Image: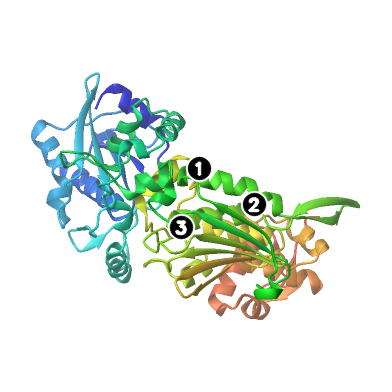
Amino acid sequence: MNGEEIGLLLRQERGQFLEFLSAYEYKKGGAQKKRSKDLARDIARLVGGMANADGGVVLIGVEPDKGVTGIPHPADEVQELIQAPQALLTPPLNPACQRAHLGNLLLLKFEVTSSPDVHRLAGSRAFYRIATETPSLPPEQIQSLKESKRHVFYERQNVPEAAWEDLDLALVESLGEKIQDPRAPKNILSQLYHLVDNSRDRPSLTMSALLLFAKETTRWHPRCGIDFVKYEGTERQHGSSLNVVKRIRFETPLCRIIDEAVGRIKEHIRERTILHDLFFRERLEYPTFAWQEALVNAVAHRDYSLTGAPVEMWMFDDRIEVRSPGLPPSPVTIEQLRQQQSIHFSRNPMLVRVLADLGYLKEMGEGIPRMFHEMDHHGLQAPEFSTEGFFFTVTLRNTPVYDEPTLRWLNQFGTSTVNVRQRRLLAYAYAHGKSFSTADYQRIAGVDRDTAYREIRLLVKLGIAAPLKPKSRTYRIIDRL
């Protein structure tokens, strides 16, 4: 690893695929080097968490703010650090590790791909990378993760009959320009993304490489694209009553398909006229982020081993349905999605990493909660999640939940300040003299008394609500308009 490669890493931000780890700890007395055993454990935790998730890079000797401080440990302790993933994880992990020097400062770079196993630290704790965090997993999720990892091999399989000539290397070159990596396209695929198997005499392309960059994707996967169908009315009709208004099939490489599909589909997202501040204004019937996030997630996380069906987007007069082949992979559950939990599991970690670098997956684990916020901010019903057969479906409805005066009044509080339950309560209060009780909150939000009390207290702390009397369980809204 040379200075140019380190510079490339330092230009990036910490995230799903990159972490910086300092070899120092900072106390009141100032900076001092970490004990080698503590630093080794930190390395094992981060590298193991990335291997359990989508893979990535951990750069040792760099502060979270990207200041390069190096590794001040002697040679024998540096060797202990290099061996940490193998010595401290069960089963042992052997990531690629490189040394580098910037002046007289030593750095270590660990690079790991998504592992088919679940790796645990001593004490049986397993960690999992989600955005910039690497939390430990509850025991029940560890077992679910093990089960899921048995089904993530489709994208990794080698395709012996495929050759470099089957790829559009200009697309790889464009990716390299976007991430500012000067390496040749073939090296980017093999060295950075591990989309090429070089373990044999003849390099072998993986299915991921073909799905992302093939000149003819349907040659390798018959239904890897997106089908957009617009219907007249609110139900699908067949035969003589067929009500298809528009059908578009997108079959370009996955690195381009999202932009192409979004560009064509947005032409069919209608605008509706609303009265706002005595002026008529136009508003899209669906928040742009919400439907695009549903489509991106479908492309990134569908089960590509189900080769008989594409991602589908059905548009009706009252809703959009984004249908993805494959049920949500454990440990992700529909109930977790409905509760807006920040969760992330990639059925296709190799695809996900490329799509993330292309800018399509910016909010690992946060996309679903933001979909809820966007729909609520626009006064629409929350996203719905369901399964039917082997399809997972996200449904977005365009029917407003609130009338325009209520929505305008609600938006003074912002979606980042209050959650969906609190906004529903505020809407209720708006229609009932701008007052409410703890019992009202329990009924409207569907929560227990403790949760209701805690979330009402937050409204009080934010200056949005106030008790009518000291120790009262009835509150009034402090109007800001």
Which mark sits nearer the N-terminus, 2 or 3?
A: 3
Against 439, is 276 above or below?
Answer: above
Element at label 2: helix
The residue type indicated by label 1 comes to Arg
Residue labelled with disc 1? 256
Q: Quadrant of the N terminus?
A: top left
Q: Residues within 10 Å of mark 1 (few under 14, many from 20)?
A: some
Q: Residue at x 63, y 61 (%)?
A: 229
Q: Nearer the viewer, residue 250 or 460?
A: 250
Q: Residues within 10 Å of mark 3 (few under 14, many from 20)?
A: some
Residue labelled with disc 3? 223
Q: Residues within 10 Å of mark 2 (few under 14, many from 20)?
A: some
Q: Residue at x 40, y 42 (%)?
A: 214
The residue type indicated by label 2 comes to Ile
The residue type indicated by label 3 comes to Arg
Q: Is residue 417 visible?
A: no
Against 237, is 9 above or below?
Answer: above
Q: Residue at x 62, y 65 (%)?
A: 420
> Separation of disc 3 and disc 1 at Cα?
16 Å
Against 275, is 214 above or below?
Answer: above
Judged left or right of residue 53, residue 478 is right
The label shown at residue 265 is: 2
Image spot of residue 18 (x, y percent): 35, 41
For the residues labelled 2 and 1, say whether their Cβ atoms are less than 8 Å apart: no
Judged left or right of residue 390, residue 186 is left
